[in-house]
Amino acid sequence: MIQFAEAAQRSQGLTDFGFLASQRLQFCHLSEKLRSLITYSPTLFIALQQLCKWAPFEDTILQMWLEHHGDHIRICSKLAGTEGLRHLEHSQWLQHVLSTHIVRQFVGPGWMPATIAFEARYRPSRETKASWPHTQFLSAQDASWIDVPASLLSLPNLTNEPLPNPPEDEPGPSGNNIINSLKLLLPSYLDGGPPTIVEMAEMAGMSLRSLQRKLAGAGLTYSDMLDCARFEHASKLLRGTEAKIIDIALSSGYADPSHFARAFRRISGVTPREFRDTGRPR
């Protein structure tokens, strides 16, 4: 495919064929499962973790991981077995643009990374640079990556729109309907102790196994949904009220503030106090 892209570029008198191809990519071109995981991720931090986890299922030779560098995080990628190949920039552009689309689901459609790094020895054309006017390009790196400010990691999904329900062999509500129902129901039960998955299955009118299968079909667990409900509840109180953190922890269903702080940081990348201090409602 790289040889084809390079041949097409030469024969058609084009420059940056990989970049031109990547311009046609949209968030909707990801697999339905990965789109679902991103859509239902409570924060950008969790969405990027899901991206790295599921990237090999999108492309079997694609490896993705996150690296922390000061006040930025890098979304890194490599294609296994391609070391030393020329013109890898064609495929690396696709990886960068898809990662950018995922960040934009949380930050906004106009967001662009401050730095785009290529594993390939590559210098973008003047036309390509004009499309990314505030972005620095690096070449011949150990891996390809784009950087994201760490301050964005705790942002929630901007769209959070329910995905269309795919056909399912199993009768009853679809996986996406179940997820949307859980998101509506769970916040009401947090302060009194959330229902168990068995109790939730009974409320949904299905067997425990059916509920687990439908959640697993979207790559989620009941624990994931409960964490998401707790985080969304707590984040609204942290940013919208002056309530004490211990009171927010208890109303979100946590037994003690330290457990709450650990769980909150795992989802957002920051502590509850840091989250509150970084700003009020955007």
Image (cartoon, rainbow, N blue to C red):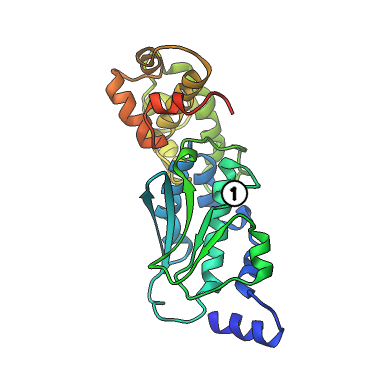
The image quadrant where one finds the C terminus is top right
Q: Residue at x 56, y 53 (%)?
A: 100
Residue 182 visible in the snapshot: yes
Residue 235 is situated, as x and y percent measured from the top left of the image, at 47, 25
Q: Residue at x 33, y 20 (%)?
A: 254
Q: How many marks?
A: 1
Position of 231 with respect to 136 (left or right) is left
Residue 220 is situated, as x and y percent measured from the top left of the image, at 43, 42
Q: Looking at the picture, does residue 19 appear above or below residue 255? A: below
Q: Which residue is drawn at 51% across and 68% down?
A: 92
- Near-viewer residue (274 or 169): 274
Residue 153 is situated, as x and y percent measured from the top left of the image, at 46, 40
- Name which quarter of the figure residue 266 lies in: top left
Identified by mark 1, the residue type is Pro
Q: Looking at the picture, does residue 269 appear above or below residue 23? A: above
Mark 1 element type: loop
**Disc 1: CA contacts within 10 A as few (<14), some (14-19) or many (>=20):** few
- Name which quarter of the figure residue 119 lies in: bottom left
- Near-viewer residue (272 or 279): 279
Find disc 1 in the rendering and name its residue. 167
Position of 159 with respect to 34 (left or right) is right
Residue lying farthest to the right in this orientation: 12
Q: Which residue is drawn at 56% across and 65% down?
A: 94
Q: Looking at the picture, does residue 259 appear above or below residue 178? A: above
Residue 230 is situated, as x and y percent measured from the top left of the image, at 42, 25
The image quadrant where one finds the N terminus is bottom right
Residue 1 visible in the snapshot: no
Position of 165 with respect to 65 (left or right) is right
